[in-house]
Image (spheres, coloured by chain):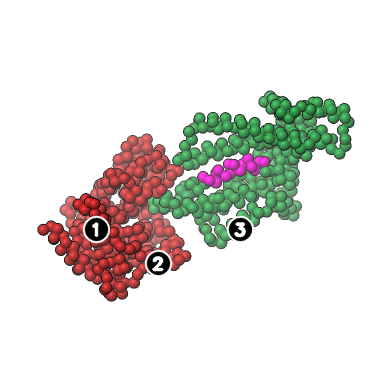
Amino acid sequence: MATSPDLVPTPAQTPADPLLDVRDLHVEFRTRDGVAKAVNGVNYTVHAGETLAVLGESGSGKSVTAQAIMGILDTPPGFVTRGQVLFQGRDLLTMSAEERRKVRGARIAMIFQDALSALNPVLTVGEQLGEMFRVHRGASRKEARAKAIELMDRVRIPAARDRVRDYPHQFSGGMRQRVMIAMAMALEPDLIIADEPTTALDVTVQAQVMDLLAELQREFTMGLILITHDLGVVADVADKIAVMYAGRIVETAPVHDIYRAPAHPYTRGLLRSIPRLDRKGRELYAIKGLPPSLLHIPPGCPFHPRCAQARGRELCRSDLPALLPVVGGRASACHFWKETLGDDNAAADRAGA
Amino acid sequence: MGRYVIRRLLQMIPVFIGSTFLIFFMVYALGDPVAALFGDRAPDPATAAQIRRDLHLNDSLGEQYLIYMRNIFTGDFGTAFNGQAVTSLMGSAFPVTIRLTLVAVVFEVVIGIALGVVTGLRRGRPVDTGVLLLTLVVISVPTFVTGYVLQYIFGVRLRWTAPSVSPSAPVGELLLPGLVLALVSLAYVTRLTRTSIAENTRADYVRTAVAKGLPQRRVIVRHLLRNSLIPVVTFIGTDIGALMGGAIVTERIFNIHGVGFQLYQGILRNNAPTVVGFVTILVLVFLIANLLVDLLYAVLDPRIRYA
């Protein structure tokens, strides 16, 4: 996205400086059964106007990373033990609680998965939207209501003027998620983190909500972190992808490269398990085994017990592969990435021939 | 909503008839009211017969009940053992008990909810454990024990308040009795609020409120507390009726001439009009309090709609 000619950089920042720069983030949960290492050294950057898709199974640490950035981790049991979260050059983790509160909602906003439980059931949507302006901007009750109606119009909720007095349960799933988006958009933040924003929705509504989100993001040149396990959603809207496994990023790449030829066996497994129309009737591929318990992450490469390529290789069992640059602005945390990439390139060439 | 209220009000009619008949029957079964009226001395047989005739005591139970109900609807609740009209006893007793109940409810709401919020937000910490232990003690010790102990400490030894309440029962003198009356319910309110708060602190909408960058105070009061109080309000509402009836013990301890005092006298003297009349009003208070709670429920939780 940074190379597209129509993108005008915001004056406060040069396009080279990332909006968000997460460095070596570690998060652990201290539970009765032991310490669960949920995030183990995550690095990623998001630029203004860019969409980063974070992909992974449940328990891969993608949501916990987002919560740590947002500062809404349940503490205890969750603790950030190491790392930096630089937002516009300032480390969020060393800010005072009050400074951080002012960033939340106003500069970085979050969209949650299930709008029905994420919205307060006993307050009208107008109150919940207007609250953003009342708290962060000191708006009067009347101004806040007017702003709420404006926001609802912007996310194309019909009859906003009447519906502003309705409660969340009176909206359909898609409309509720639009309310969530409106709430995140309210103060025109620089960064939005969307945690599986369409998972709870019907397929037809999913596309509408994603389109709306992408459109608003373009309009305001916001950074967007899209957390998902839905590879279909990612292809259309993301600029780059980070794949997470057991609290680590195992592969990053520009979006289209990863579909053509993944450089990590786990990514390849994920891609193969997408149902495809041209493979109708055949059994769906599934990655063997289960993701590791975060209490006991296997030594070496955490994916080795489930990896076909690791079979018989001592290196995979003993050495943790670092996330290193491979080709074309991509990075992979696999000792044998050349092999992985080569396989698929060859396969893609065969298919193309 | 209107239809719902009407239906609920109509449901009160059979409950009202049933409960008054039950009470009437129980008082009737207690024994001979004429003998009770005269205490230890045996009454003159002619006088006794005269009183029996006047009070329709020679009629069957059903007939007596019908006569009583007919009188109630003309506003005649009969006379107490001392010749006073039951309605005039009610006129002096109910305001006193209502005042006492209100004092108790204020204690319940203010102290109970405050303790519940504090302990709910600090689960497992010393404050939480301490308060929890205290509520357990309060719940397990009977009211008459806490009543006499507090009366002795604050009324007799420290002289902070009058140990016994004067007939006019001003609010100032009702503070200690109100606290005693409230104590057990207060402990329940604390525990209920604590559980409810603790449950809701992990709710998604609370996380949303934090993610919106709201100050902690606003998150707790507007988002967390508002949702957590729904079960507490239900409890307090139904408790109002129970407090008024349960004031018998407290009113005895502090010599308050309220409903409990009059009921006690009525039972002692086998005086059916007093007992049935007072209990009937208490039943009505209970029914209305319950209806109000159900209506309040819909106000607090917009997901509930009555049709």
User: According to the image, label 3 marks what residue?
Assistant: B133
Q: Amino acid at mark 1?
A: Arg
Residue A65 is situated, as x and y percent measured from the top left of the image, at 35, 60
The answer to whether residue B30 is magenta is no
Residue A179 is situated, as x and y percent measured from the top left of the image, at 35, 44
Taking the image as shown, residue B216 lies to the left or right of residue A255, namely right
Q: Reply above or below: A9 against A37.
A: above
Residue A64 or residue A16, whichever sits in front: A64
* Colour applied to chain A: red
Name the chain letter of the residue that bears numbered label 2: A
Which disc, if any, is residue A272? 1
- Distance (Cα) linking label 2 and label 3: 35 Å
Q: Secondary structure at mark 1?
A: helix
* Residue B233 lies in quadrant: top right
Q: Secondary structure at mark 3?
A: helix
User: Which mark lies nearer to you, 2 or 3?
Assistant: 2
Residue A194 is situated, as x and y percent measured from the top left of the image, at 32, 52
Specify the principal SS of the magenta part.
helix
* Colour applied to chain B: green
Q: Reply above or below: B197 against A127.
A: below
Crowdedness near tag 1: few (<14), some (14–19) or many (≥20) residues, C-alpha within 10 Å:
some
Taking the image as shown, residue B297 lies to the left or right of residue B92, namely left
Number of numbered labels in the structure image: 3
Residue B41 or residue B65, whichever sits in front: B65
Residue A71 or residue A200, whichever sits in front: A200
* Residue A149 lies in quadrant: top left
Residue found 35% across the figure and 43% down from its top: A173
Name the chain letter of the residue that bears numbered label 1: A
